[in-house]
Image: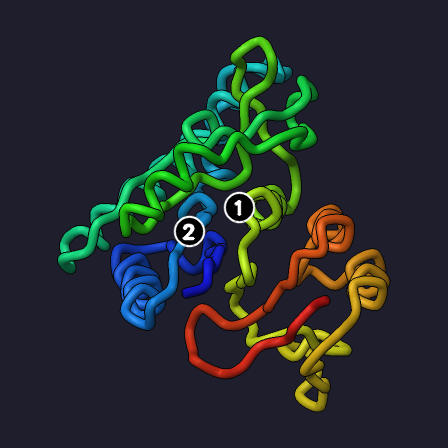
């Protein structure tokens, strides 16, 4: 039995139909004998919509209140995914950043993960439950909700993989791996079967949007093996490690 952390971005959970698709993928991993932890982003354009709501009321909203507002997006998608899994006859439990034990510093909008107190997640997965964690968020020493900034859900997934000693952290996206160029713009782009952390960092810092550099830096430091693959097909992805 291996432990897999699987992260799904906003496009992967943008509708009830796509949430059902994610639920089926996670259940398939469970049926194959793996322990499973899912990390989810907010549905579709939810974060942008919440930013717009705040802007309609306050030209300069307080950072603390913005973090509190934006964290709700992931909480919606995590609970809906847990419900979809339960509807298919498998046990699931959703966790906010606080409930997952994700401790950060106090920097609102770009917090850094300091520690993951993994006891509650470990207890759930040892009971055979699929744990569904809200990405992009944590809690600081004052008990305030913080958000992790751009690429935050990827960073959440890598941090959980590190502190849970997962065998693999799989990042599901709308492309089926890491390419030398954007395959949506360049039909002749070449997909990597495997790429080193350092080369992935170069691509990320050069503008490749498939993984954020903070996520890759954390994976390199904690020796977390990543796989970037498509949420919409079963094609093999790219191993980063």
**How far is mark 2 from mark 1, CA to CA?**
10 Å
In the rendered image, residue 184, in percent from the top left (x then y), is placed at: 62, 77
Residue 52 seen by the camera = no
Badge 1: residue crowd in 10 Å (few <14, some 14–19, many ≥20): some
Badge 2 is on which residue? 37
Protein image colouring: rainbow
Badge 2: residue crowd in 10 Å (few <14, some 14–19, many ≥20): many
- In this rendering, position of residue 59 left or right of residue 112: left
In the rendered image, residue 217, in percent from the top left (x then y), is placed at: 77, 50
Kind of element beneath mark 2: strand
Q: Quadrant of residue 152?
A: top right
- Is the Cβ of the residue at disc 2 closer than 8 Å to that at disc 1? yes
Residue under the image location 49 percent in, 35 percent down: 118
174 versus 150 height, above or below: below
Name the one closer to the observer, 63 or 87: 87
Name the one closer to the observer, 127 or 175: 127
């Amino acid at each position: 039995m291996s432990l897999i952390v699987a992260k799904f971005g906003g496009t992967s959970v943008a509708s009830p139909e796509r949430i059902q698709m994610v639920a089926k993928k996670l259940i398939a991993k469970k049926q194959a004998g793996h322990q499973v932890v899912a990390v989810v982003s907010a549905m579709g354009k939810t974060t942008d919509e919440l930013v717009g709501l705040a802007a309609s009321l306050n030209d300069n909203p307080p950072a603390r209140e913005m973090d509190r507002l934006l964290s709700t997006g992931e909480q919606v998608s995590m609970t809906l995914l847990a419900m979809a899994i339960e509807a298919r006859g498998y046990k699931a439990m959703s966790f906010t950043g606080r409930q997952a034990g994700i401790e950060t510093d106090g920097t609102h909008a770009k917090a850094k993960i300091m520690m993951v107190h993994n006891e509650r997640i470990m207890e759930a997965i040892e009971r055979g439950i699929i744990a569904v964690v809200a990405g992009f968020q944590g809690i600081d020493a004052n008990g305030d909700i913080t958000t992790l900034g751009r690429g935050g859900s990827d960073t959440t997934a890598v941090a959980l993989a590190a502190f849970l000693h997962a065998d693999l952290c799989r990042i599901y996206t709308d492309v089926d791996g890491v390419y030398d160029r954007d395959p949506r713009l360049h039909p002749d782009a070449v997909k990597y079967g495997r790429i080193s952390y350092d080369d992935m960092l170069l691509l990320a810092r050069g503008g490749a949007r498939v993984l954020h550099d903070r996520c890759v830096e954390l994976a390199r430091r904690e020796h977390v093996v990543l796989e970037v693959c498509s949420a919409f097909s079963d094609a093999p992805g790219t191993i980063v490690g």
